[in-house]
Image (cartoon, grey):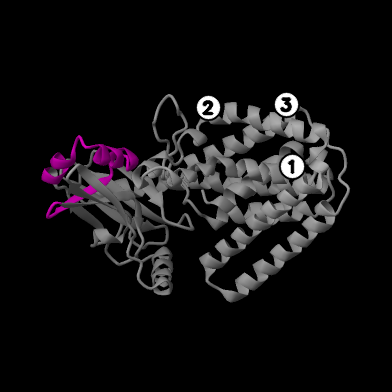
Amino acid sequence: MDSLTQIVLGAAVGEAVLGKKIGNRAMIWGAIGGTIPDLDVMTNLFMGELQAMCAHRGITHSIFFSIVAPLAFAWLLSYLYRSGAYRATGYKAFISIINTIVLALIVYGVYAASGSMPVLILSGAFAAYLIWRLYKYYLAKELSDVRVSFKEWYLLFFLAFFTHIALDCFTTYGTQIFQPFSDLRVAFNTIAVADPAYTLPFVIFLVAAVFSSKGSRRRSILNWTGIGISSLYLLFTVFNRAHIDNVFERALDHRGIEVERQMVSPTLLQNVLWNCVAESDTAYFVGMYSMFDSDPNMHSIQSLRKDPEATSELEGTLEYEALEWFSNGYLYTIDNDSLYDLYDLRFGPSRYRDVMNAPEDYVFRFQLRPVADGLKFNQVQPETGDIGEEFKRFTRRVKGY
């Protein structure tokens, strides 16, 4: 899921575990714990583009990591509070700077997603208010004693890591939860990587809980209400995926199309419009279905013929095998005069046309070019066109045909 969702989920978990004992500190450490697994994106600094893409959601998103890593963090936090170092001005200033940077990044992310100046002003004003509270009630305040056991710190970080990993499994990207013993990628394909319907209840009730008294019944009810609503929505996405899968299967049968396997996945920001992909020996079959569509057998299913010659030329190369693994085999490959275009069909398009007749519309597009020492990999950014116009088309498609 997106970073904001994981931060909020981690904060809610921290509050549920230690909120009664240490108040807002529990939310802060939970939010940090909810962010740590995604620090594997730093592999971009010392790995190639393809290797970094495959490494994301690897060892830091494994059950092994969620069990072992909390030992180090629990020891560190136990020492920090047992020694009294958390009261030092330098430490408090450091944490305040980190929190300010995080708030600034969140405000920027909200503005980038909305493109609205009023949204920027409102979110910036709220962030400024939180920074003021951070100064008044943390940086400039004499902090109270913190008495938390190693076991309690371990539980906080274990749950922050584990819930992060579990939530990522519900998306389409694929999460290597069995690392370092297996590189199997788990993907339930029930929720988009960013879905406000899941995130907003967490944000609303968590913010309300922040302004409630430590250990109060109201604070606990608010936090658990946010957790409960978002969890119920996640459960809804599971049943909705099963429904859409049945719709796609019936649509294929209605057209007499026999396939070896199929998958469906929600498109960005909602759980109404779904990308549908199936595979036979000779072709991939793709389409989109909105829960508001008038045709229960889907308006259109497009056939993408496989290029067995291009596939046979690439098989056995490290780059192609990595992309096959990454895409779970839903890799549409075209030979354009020895420049191989490859499309991961799982994620759907970045442009919303009446019929998906252009492979270039797909979000994940790669190129492999033969060079003297093998193949050169390049990830091609999707063609989005005018963002405002594309969003209007997306909204119309969500509303159904």
* Residue name at image x 72 percent, y 32 percent: 153
Q: Which residues are magenta?
A: 309-338
* Residue name at image x 32 percent, y 43 percent: 327
Q: Residue furthest top?
A: 181
Seen from the viewer's position, the closer of residues 174 and 291 is 174
Mark carried by residue 26: 1
Amino acid at pointer 1: Ala
Q: Position of residue 312 (x, y in %)?
A: 14, 39
Q: Which residue is mark 3?
A: 151
Q: Position of residue 112 (x, y in %)?
A: 52, 66
Q: Which residue is mark 2?
A: 64
Cα–Cα gap, marks 3 and 1: 14 Å
Q: Position of residue 331 (x, y in %)?
A: 26, 46
Lower position in the chain sequence, tag 2 or tag 3: 2
Lower position in the chain sequence, tag 1 or tag 2: 1
Q: Residues within 10 Å of mark 2 (few under 14, many from 20)?
A: some
Mark 2 residue element: helix
Q: Residues within 10 Å of mark 3 (few under 14, many from 20)?
A: few
Mark 1 residue element: helix
Left or right: residue 325 compared with residue 372 = right
Is residue 207 a member of the stretch shown in magenta?
no
Q: Is residue 167 above or below residue 3?
A: above
